Amino acid sequence: MNGELSSFEEYISRCKPEQKDIYYLVAPSRELALSSPYLETFESSGIEVILVYSAIDDFVMNNLQKFSGRTLISAEKGGLDLGEGQDDAKEDDTEDSSENETKLSTDESNEFCAWFKIELSDKVESCKVTNRLGASPAVVTDHESGALRRMMRMVDTQNGSRDEMPLPKQTVEINPNHPVIVGLNDIRKKEPMLAKVCAEQVFDNCLVAAGLLDDGRSMLPRLNGILESLVKGAVKVSTIKAEESKDKKE
């Protein structure tokens, strides 16, 4: 992922001996690709991913399927088996998580996933825990191609069609060690309405990362509501601290 053009033969020559597949990621630009949560597990495992930026490239990858006996697999696929590299990543995750003060236990993770699916039942097909994430709270996997979806919407628009392309329910994988997920689990019973709004935002963030959110403007009312809650909470804390400071002086 050094930004240079590379052939499949060159990619294979750089692969670890145990790597049997070719991994790729489709994104609108290199900058967006490098910031994608789908790369996190590959970076920690030391496995190279081919970056492609055109919907046509995505179409080619899907139809080519194999090259030189190796299967072409999207980095956005769920249940990835990265071999020994993934085992090493799991050990690293365990060491990192041991340093975290808070993380969800197995039971808490299962309960959270069940809650998440129920709250977003009209959008989420299933929710499960993953160890593929580090800096991101969640991703959607095994979804339709965002690049091809954008291309089809462009074709429909040019043909004069205004019918929306319904997005099927998604498979969500959550990071049980991420502060957002841990915090959501903490407030989902104390502040159920706020927790649901935040869960919807987490889900939309996943769609953005996958290139599946057709119109980001749909998030604005929710984002404004979240900001309002944060500002009110900050003002309340600031007021309490000011009163405590005043009392101490008196």
Image (cartoon, rainbow, N blue to C red):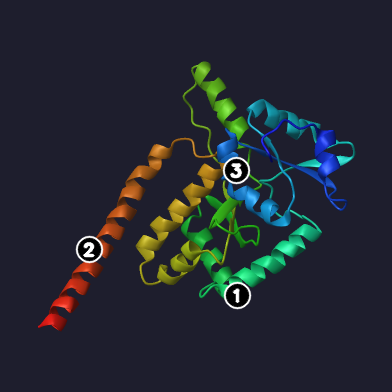
Task: Point out residue 147 in the picture as x, y percentages from the top left corner.
Answer: 60, 32
Who comes first in sequence, dot 3 or dot 1?
3
Who comes first in sequence, dot 1 or dot 2?
1
Task: Point out residue 43 in the picture as x, y percentages from the top left corner.
Answer: 68, 52
Quadrant where the image shows the C terminus: bottom left
Number of marks drawn? 3
Quadrant where the image shows the N terminus: top right
Who comes first in sequence, dot 3 or dot 2?
3
* SS state under label 2: helix
Q: Looking at numbered disc 1 in the image, what kind of residue is underneath it?
A: Ser
Q: Looking at numbered disc 2 in the image, what kind of residue is underneath it?
A: Val
Q: Nearer the viewer, mark 3 or mark 2?
A: 3
Q: Is residue 166 visible?
A: yes
Residue pointed to by mark 1: 98
Residue 217 badge: none
Residue 235 badge: 2
Left-right relation of 237 to 125:
left
Residue at the left extreme of this rendering: 250
Q: Nearer the viewer, residue 120 or 180?
A: 180
Disc 2 residue crowd, few under 14, some 14–19, many 20+, Cα 10 Å: few
Task: Point out residue 91 in the picture as x, y percentages from the top left corner.
Answer: 71, 68
Q: Looking at numbered disc 3 in the image, what kind of residue is underneath it?
A: Leu
Quarter of the view holding residue 187: bottom left
Disc 3 residue crowd, few under 14, some 14–19, many 20+, Cα 10 Å: some
Residue pointed to by mark 3: 34
The correct choice, above or below, for 37 with respect to 6 in the image is: below
Q: Do the residues under discs 3 and 1 have CB atoms within 8 angstroms?
A: no
The correct choice, above or below, for 215 with respect to 236 in the image is: above
Q: Nearer the viewer, residue 7 or 23?
A: 7
* SS state under label 3: helix
Q: Do the residues under discs 3 and 2 have CB atoms within 8 angstroms?
A: no
* SS state under label 1: helix
